[in-house]
Each structure stands twice: as C-alpha cells, then as structure tokens.
Image: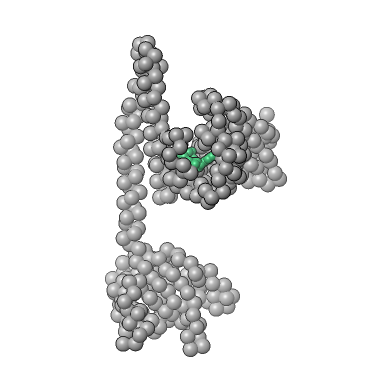
C-alpha cells in the first residue's frame, strides 16, 4: 500500500475526492464504513449517490456554476449537510471542502464527518435544559407568591427583622426566576422554537414604557433613569415583549454597573433609514480586552463582582439574538472606568400595521 493511501485509510473522517464532474476518485476506509459502500463500488460513480435527493440536484448545479463562474462559495467552509447511506438512511454530516489540482485537472477534496452523535447530544442537552427549567419554574412561582404576600404585610405586620429577611428572600427568588427564564429563552432561541409577533410600534412609546418599567429598579440602586429624544412619527417593526426584554436588559445592566447617585440615559436618535436607542451609563465600563466576549453566552467580565450577583451572563447573548432576529443590530462602546453606551438599531417601519391602527394602540399623537 502506498504511503498516501495508508494515511487516508487511518483517518477517522471520510475522505472523498471528486473530479469537476462530481465523479468519485478517492474513497477512503472511513468513507466506506460511513456510507456502507466499498471503494471499488464507488470509484467512478457520481458523488450524488451519497446525498439525499434534495442535495443531489443542488450539487450538480453548484458544480456547473462553479466551473463557469469560478465562484466557490463552499470552499474553505465547514457546512452541515446530509448524507445518504447505502441502506437509504439520511444522516447529518459536517463537510470540509478544499480544491486541489491533480495531473493538470481540478479536483475537490471533501472531508466528511458523521455528526449523528453530536446532533443527538445537542438535542438531549436542549431537552434537558427545557425540562429542568420548567420543573424549577413551577415551584419557584409557588414560593414567590406566598413570599411576596408575606412581604406586603397583608398577612400581618412584620417586625423589622422579619421584614428584612423576607426582603432578601424575595429578591433572591426574583433572581432565580430571572435566571430560569433566561435559560428557557436561551434554549428556545438555540433550538429555533421561539416565535415572534412583530408589528409596527411607535418607538417613543416603546422606550417610554421601558423607562417606566425600570423606574423602581433604578430607585433601588439610587440611580436616576431618564429618556431623551424620539419623535411621534417614528415606528419600528418588532415584537413588543421581546423589544422590552432587550431594552430592559440593557437598562438593568446600566443601572447595575452604575454608582449610587449616577444617571442613566435612554436616548432615541433617528436617521433616514435607521433608528437607534442608546442606553448610556457612567459606571465601571468594560475594558477593551473583554469587548469581544460581551455578547457570548454565560459571559460576565467579573463573575465575583457583587453587582453581578443574580445575573446569568445570558442577558446580552439573548438580546443580541432577539435583536438580529427582528432585523436589528446591537452594539456598544465602552472603556474601563468610563461608563458604557449600549445601543440597538432597527430599520424604520414605514407606517403602522393596519391591525395596530384598528386597535388604536399606537397611533401618532
Ligand atoms: N453597562 C455595563 N457596564 C459595564 N459592564 C457591563 C454593562 N453591561 C454589561 N456588562 C458586562 O457584560 C456582562 C454580561 O451582561 P449580561 O449578558 O446582561 O449578563 P448579566 O447581566 O446576567 O451579568 C456583565 O456581567 C458585565 O460584565
Ligand atoms: Mg444583564
């Protein structure tokens, strides 16, 4: 056996080379095991046999386009596709593609990995998170209800010590509920099971609502929260609850990382095509070296910071995902010790949806 084919045969991934007409030239041992054909059977066959019908047609077109246009969109990428085994089973694969020249002809080398197991584990993980979160959410709600009733004093006057202890319990209960909700949202987003109900809304009203909802929180941090800008005839097309969730998270972060006595501003600025909402604080800021992981899930600059207690590090990851799903963009500017400005921008919606006009909910003043 030659040196090269010995190497090919010990590689754990399937290695399949084709010519520019899609005919198989090399089919290593792992490819044999994966697809259930022998190399002898496959050499000279078109690679389409190894794909479900939908991919097979697309692949022909792709190769044709490539030889005429020279545009190789997939080269160098690792797309997730589907393969078809000899017994007809369709299974998920990850494919790495490169182009090479062999005896003066163009050839394509694909490295194929069977990702059935990885997909199964991903699914299990998602199910696990969903189940655990649901199982936590129900009893938590049942703890929170009676606890806030006690705290309200309706069940009897509380001594200062009991009032204080109950306050701590209520607050931690809220943090835990928030964490469970974030986990649930995160799972829904990553499994694509989150549905959005987007409509046209007046931006100024949305922002006003967000500021109002967070006044109590601002009060608890001793920070003032104010709104600026926004004209009456600016609309954006978003899911209202999800937009509130995004802005709520940006505002909560700004408050959480501010000094007592500071101010947080929520400002609307309007361009010809895009409108932007910025949340600016004068708090601890984010050092340059942490910038690229701020939107990553479970990412907190300083997990030990007392101010991050109760946070999951999921808020911004969820906010980014939601914003992009609604056609917007999210970003920030910050330096250590110099506060931060987080912003979201959305395309202007031309005018309110008829349905919204009918309800009379957000007509321009
Ligand atoms: N306004 C801000 N000022 C300083 N740091 C911030 C600000 N907003 C977010 N961060 C940093 O980004 C991290 C992630 O934020 P987020 O995803 O909302 O998670 P959480 O609020 O649960 O910690 C925070 O823990 C903090 O380190
Ligand atoms: Mg947060």
Quarter in which the C terminus is drawn: top right
Indicate whether 85 appears above or below 23: above
Q: Name the one closer to the observer, 348 or 269.
A: 269
Indicate whether 250 appears above or below 171: below
The residue located at (59%, 44%) in the rendering is: 335
Residue pushed farthest right?
272
| Residue 121 x, y percent position in the rendering | 32, 55
**Viewed as shown, does residue 23 lie left or right of 219?**
left
Indicate whether 82 appears above or below 295: below
Q: Name the one closer to the observer, 174 or 43.
A: 174
The residue located at (31%, 87%) in the rendering is: 1
| Residue 338 x, y percent position in the rendering | 61, 39
Q: Place residue 171 in its image quadrant.
A: top left
Indicate whether 155 appears above or below 269: above
Q: Quick check: can you spot residue 58?
A: yes
**Viewed as shown, does residue 1 lie left or right of 327?**
left
The residue located at (58%, 26%) in the rendering is: 261
């Amino acid at each position: 056996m030659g040196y090269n084919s010995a190497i090919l045969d010990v590689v754990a991934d399937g290695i399949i080379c084709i010519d520019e007409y899609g005919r198989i030239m090399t089919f290593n041992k792992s490819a044999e095991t994966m697809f259930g054909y022998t190399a002898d059977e496959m050499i000279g066959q078109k690679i389409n046999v190894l794909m479900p019908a939908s991919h097979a047609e697309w692949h022909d077109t792709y190769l044709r386009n490539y030889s005429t246009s020279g545009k190789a969109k997939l080269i160098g990428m690792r797309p997730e596709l589907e393969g078809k085994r000899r017994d007809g089973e369709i299974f998920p694969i990850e494919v790495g593609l490169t182009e090479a020249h062999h005896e003066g002809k163009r050839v394509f080398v694909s490295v194929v990995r069977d990702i059935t197991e990885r997909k199964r584990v991903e699914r299990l993980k998602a199910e696990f998170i969903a189940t655990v979160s649901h199982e936590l959410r129900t009893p938590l709600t049942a703890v929170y209800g009676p606890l806030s009733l006690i705290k309200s004093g309706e069940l009897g006057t509380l001594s200062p010590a009991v009032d204080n202890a109950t306050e701590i319990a209520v607050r931690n209960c809220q943090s835990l509920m928030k964490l469970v909700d974030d986990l649930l949202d995160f799972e829904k987003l990553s499994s694509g099971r989150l549905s959005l109900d987007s409509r046209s809304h007046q931006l100024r009203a949305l922002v006003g609502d967000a500021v109002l909802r967070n006044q109590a929180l601002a009060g608890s941090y001793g920070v003032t929260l104010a709104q600026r800008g926004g004209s009456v005839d600016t609309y954006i097309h978003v899911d209202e609850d999800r937009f509130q969730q995004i802005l709520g998270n940006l505002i909560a972060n700004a408050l959480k990382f501010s000094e007592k006595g500071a101010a947080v501003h929520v400002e609307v600025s309007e361009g010809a095509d895009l409108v932007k909402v910025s949340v600016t604080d004068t708090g601890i800021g984010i050092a340059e070296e942490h910038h690229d992981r701020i939107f990553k899930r479970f990412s907190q600059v300083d997990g030990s910071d007392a101010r991050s207690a109760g946070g999951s590090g999921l808020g911004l990851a969820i906010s980014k995902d939601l914003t992009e799903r609604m056609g917007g963009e999210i970003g920030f500017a910050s330096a250590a010790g110099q506060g931060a400005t987080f912003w979201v921008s959305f395309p202007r919606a031309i005018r309110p949806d008829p349905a919204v006009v009918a309800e009379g909910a957000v007509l321009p003043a």
